[in-house]
Image: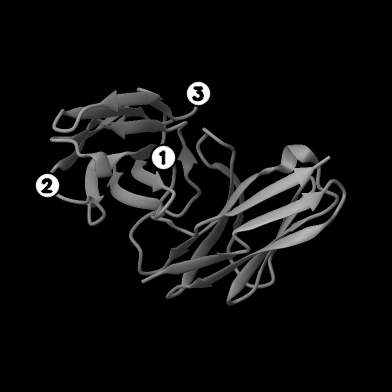
Amino acid sequence: EDQVTQSPEALRLQEGESSSLNCSYTVSGLRGLFWYRQDPGKGPEFLFTLYSAGEEKEKERLKATLTKKESFLHITAPKPEDSATYLCAVQGEETSGSRLTFGEGTQLTVNP
Amino acid sequence: DAGVIQSPRHEVTEMGQEVTLRCKPISGHNSLFWYRQTMMRGLELLIYFNNNVPIDDSGMPEDRFSAKMPNASFSTLKIQPSEPRDSAVYFCASSFRVRGELFFGEGSRLTVL
């Protein structure tokens, strides 16, 4: 069974204070690791897909990296509008189709 | 292109009543998912369709829950009878390829009194 654990559960940063969110996973053959952003009252919004260890993806102030056991979402010089819950999900070889297993999420608050 | 459209956005009902949630996936997507989100359990997959056929319904809590996808542009999730523990946000998501990212709707917030 695929498992995803995210840490920390919540993170408060000052504007401009860089940090990283962690996603540890257990999966039988990783087909893909996904990062989503979720704002209050909204559905998760797709950010990145990573497929193999060593891969990196960037989007504005966000950078996602992947190893064989975990993924990091690095936030550089965050702004208050980066405040959201960040969700990590995996898709394993043994799961059918596009089924994703999600972590509990990290709630990020960036104070001005 | 319009995203995944869900209705209603909010539903308040009394225990024992039937609830029907609706979803229109993104045009051209051939996979559709129903997820439930609660504070306690996070996002849980309820059921997954591929080309309108249910592939995996192992996440459906019990017989009170049922889902249909009569065509490529419409799906329903029905709860009958509803119970207070069914209160949650229900998300519909679609995907255009077998191994790809999911695109989520805004969700339907259900409150069962």
Q: Which residue is mark 1?
A: B93
Mark linked to residue B63? 2
Question: Who comes first in sequence, dot 3 or dot 1?
Answer: 3
Q: Secondary structure at mark 3?
A: loop
Q: Nearer the viewer, residue B17 or A5?
A: B17
Q: Are marks 2 and 1 on the same chain?
A: yes
Labels 2 and 1 touching (C-beta < 8 A): no
Q: Does A109 sit left or right of A111 as displayed?
A: left
Parent chain of label 1: B
- Quadrant housing the C terminus of chain A: top right
Q: Label 1: few (<14), some or many (≥20) within 10 Å?
A: many
Q: Position of residue A42 (x, y in %)?
A: 52, 34
Q: Secondary structure at mark 2?
A: loop
Q: Position of residue B36 (x, y in %)?
A: 36, 45
Q: Which residue is mark 3?
A: B2
Parent chain of label 2: B
Q: Secondary structure at mark 1?
A: strand
Q: CA distance from mark 3 to mark 1?
A: 13 Å
Amino acid at dot 3: Ala
